[in-house]
Image: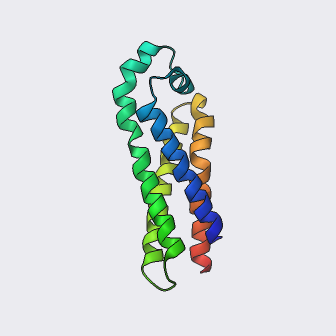
């Protein structure tokens, strides 16, 4: 369970790094803004500052999850390090999951994106809780 949870936390963090690159670095490229349902280059330019700011939440959550994974994977049994790691994983992946829920509640057209954004952190949290409860 631990390894599976860490794998899904890693995948969730990696996805959020990718989302960061789209929202904060490549927003005005047609391939990116079309993915976010914008209809024109002008709309992309207009929303660029908002997307840039929004995008930066993603690497912060990803870094927390990556650090948490490292703490759990490398921490000695009985030390505080795994506790810190699980706290970071649950906090960061839980935030990713809640953001996906907000996205899903924003409208039916966002359900696929919300499922993509929320599946891996959900699995990381559920499997992590099972691993902690069993351990």
Residue 24 found in image quarter: top left
Q: Is residue 81 above or below residue 46?
A: below
- Percent coordinates x, y for residue 109 in the rendering: 59, 28
Figure colour scheme: rainbow
- The tally of labels here is 0
- Percent coordinates x, y for residue 71 in the rendering: 47, 71
- Percent coordinates x, y for residue 117 in the rendering: 57, 44
Residue 111 found in image quarter: top right
Residue found 63% across the figure and 68% down from its top = 3
The quadrant of the image that shows the C terminus is bottom right
Q: Is residue 121 above or below residue 79?
A: above
Residue found 42% across the figure and 33% down from its top = 25
- Is residue 126 at least partly visible in the picture? no
Comparing 46 with 91, the one in front is 46
The quadrant of the image that shows the N terminus is bottom right
- Percent coordinates x, y for residue 133 in the rendering: 58, 76
Residue found 47% across the figure and 37% down from its top = 21
- Is residue 113 at least partly visible in the picture? yes
- Left/right placement of residue 133 relative to residue 23 reads right
Residue found 49% across the figure and 68% down from its top = 70
- Left/right placement of residue 126 relative to residue 28 reads right
């Amino acid at each position: 369970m631990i390894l599976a949870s860490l794998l899904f936390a890693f995948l969730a963090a990696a996805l959020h790094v990718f989302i960061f690159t789209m929202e904060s670095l490549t927003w005005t490229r047609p391939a990116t803004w079309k993915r976010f349902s914008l209809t024109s280059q002008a709309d992309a330019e207009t929303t660029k500052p908002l997307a840039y700011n929004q995008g930066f939440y993603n690497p912060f959550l990803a870094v927390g999850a990556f650090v948490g994974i490292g703490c759990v994977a490398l921490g000695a049994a009985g030390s505080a390090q795994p506790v810190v790691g699980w706290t970071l994983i649950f906090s960061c992946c839980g935030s990713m999951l809640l953001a996906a829920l907000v996205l899903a509640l924003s409208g039916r057209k966002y359900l696929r994106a919300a499922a993509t954004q929320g599946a891996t952190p959900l699995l990381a949290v559920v499997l992590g809780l099972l691993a902690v409860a069993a351990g």
